[in-house]
Amino acid sequence: MRSRIESTETAGAVQLAGYLTLLVTPAALLATAIGASSAHSSATIGFGVAVVLVGSVSVVSERGRLFETERSARTGTQQDVGTVFAVVLGAVCTYLLSVAGGFGPVLASAVVGVGVGIAVPRMDSQVYCGSFVGMVSPAVIPSLEYLVVAGLIAGGVFVATDEVFGGVGGKLGTIALCGCASIVALTGLEYGAGGAPAWEFAALVVPVAVAGAVVTLLVSVHLGFGAVVGSGVVGVGASVVFPLASSEPAVGTMLAAVAFCASFVGMSSVTRLEMRHVALAGGLCGLVYLVTMPAFDGAGGKLGTVAFIACLAMIGATELETHIRTRLARD
């Protein structure tokens, strides 16, 4: 009995650590972006702060669920080892496709997602999470040795966060960014020099982001292909269509990244984001993408973290709306 209690307490500590990790990573991205934007636009800073404040509502709610839910004891099972291996495998495959194969990060990750979602659906989330680690620029992580370590860290975080923020879009990318950021911090590697937020493209970015989120939801839920395949299909399509449709290659590449980024919003569970809110969260994701352009450039998992921030903010907004409506109804 005592062993059972100690195991359950350990599980609670692991979940708490995972919860904090999934907060620190997007907070670091936003803080860096807002700090870099201080020389460019006070509106950017204001928007970033507003996103944090609204998102904090969902963060507090998740903390309540974390401590109210009965914890299951963890024993370091073989399944956890398999999870970590799958994350590392996804990272290596994607990195090789992206760098050596010349696919580029978005197409490489999307292809891995579609492939694993169809071939091995029971491990699709783990491998897809690893694929986001593998999206890292070789200028940031220049060798497979560093990449494998980043994948191992991400795999450990995946296990620790198994019961935290379930069904929130962008969680897998946030885990991946944690792995990449950890390696950068531990080894002295450096991110790329991100530019100022390109607000002049907002009129393109926001509609593309809305479409990316909605199409993912349609493929995932309405067509029944699942979230990983739904996101991967959007990534593959965006990687082909936007570079060809744009007269400027850099703009086409950016829009493909935006669509893929928003596809992670569309991966959200309907218990977290109702269908009518997915489009709004997608548009918000496009704005957060622009805000965070100066930060963590070239890091794997950044796009997913952007989606995670947007989803937390939208979930927080809906919870706040529900609370206000309830209070008004009582009065």
Image (cartoon, rainbow, N blue to C red):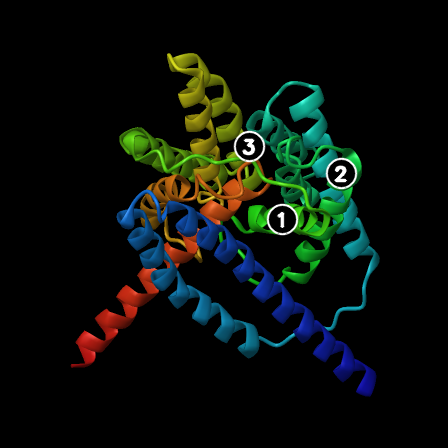
Which residue is outermost to the left? 331
Tell which circle, 2 or 1, labels the residue nearer the N-terminal end: 2
Whether residue 69 can be seen here:
yes
For the residues labelled 3 and 1, the Cα–Cα distance comes to: 24 Å
Q: Quadrant of the C terminus?
A: bottom left
Q: Nearer the viewer, residue 252 or 200?
A: 200
Residue 128 on image: x %, y %: 63, 40
Name which quarter of the figure residue 24 lies in: bottom right
Q: CA distance from mark 3 to mark 2?
A: 17 Å
**Element class at badge 3:** helix
Is 188 situated left or right of 227 in this image? right
Relative to 166, 55 lies left or right: left
Amino acid tagged 1: Ala
- In which quadrant of the rendered view does residue 39 lie? top left
Whether residue 1 is visible to the viewer of this picture, yes or no, is no
Query: Which residue is found at the position 62% from the left and 27% from the top?
Result: 108
Task: Give the residue number, with chain letter if any, for mark 1.
Answer: 181
Task: Give the image location of residue 111, x and y in percent.
Answer: 62, 27
Nearest to the eye among marks 3 and 2: give it.
2
Classify 8 as above or below 251.
below
Q: Amino acid at mark 2?
A: Leu
Q: In the image, what residue occupies the spot 49% across and 75% down?
A: 64
